[in-house]
Image: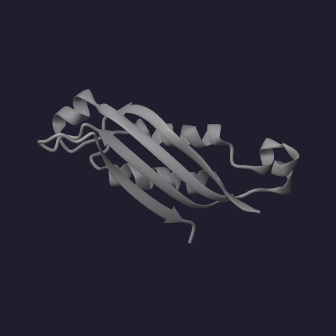
Amino acid sequence: MQGKVSLEGLEFHAYHGVYPHERSSGNKFEVDILVDTTFDASAFRDELTGTLNYEELYLVVKAVMEKPSKLLETVANQIALDTLATFKEAIAVEVKISKFNPPIGGVCRKASVVVLTNRS
């Protein structure tokens, strides 16, 4: 059976950005991840082995967020690719990354990027 597993509002202090001050002092980021997946029958018998373990999914996101990058697109794509590589039952992955108070020269609560990747 197909379904979705998501983690929403994951918060990280990370060092992503084009400007040197972003990469030295860091910023607050929020990540939402939605995974289209297949559930094995054992998931409906209350067994964790039949579903995508969202604690392990969090660890995939965390590992990528810990590696500084210039662009959010790069980070989101790497999270999606690592998710597909880690979970054989994952069919497609959507990752949204938001940077709070981006340096755009004006007031902006957050800037976001969304990447959608599938196994094909």
Residue 56: x %, y % from top left: 63, 40
Relative vertical location of residue 81 with respect to residue 119 in this rendering, above or below: above
Furthest-top residue in this view: 25
Relative vertical location of residue 2 with respect to residue 106 in this rendering, above or below: below
Give the residue at x 42% y 59%.
115
| Left or right for 105, reference 50 | left
Q: Where's the N terminus, which quadrant?
A: bottom right
Give the residue at x 31% y 44%.
69
Residue 49: x %, y % from top left: 79, 46
Give the residue at x 44% y 33%.
11
Q: How is the image coloured?
A: one colour
Q: Is 118 in front, or is 46?
A: 46
Residue 28: x %, y % from top left: 34, 32
Furthest-bottom residue in this view: 120
Furthest-right residue in this view: 45
Q: Residue 19, located in which quarter of the rendered image?
A: top left
| Left or right for 3, reference 85 | right
Residue 50: x %, y % from top left: 79, 50
Give the residue at x 43% y 51%.
96
Q: Residue 21, located in which quarter of the rendered image?
A: top left
| Left or right for 118, reference 114 | right
Furthest-left residue in this view: 105
Q: Where's the C terminus, which quadrant?
A: bottom right
| Left or right for 98, reference 17 | right
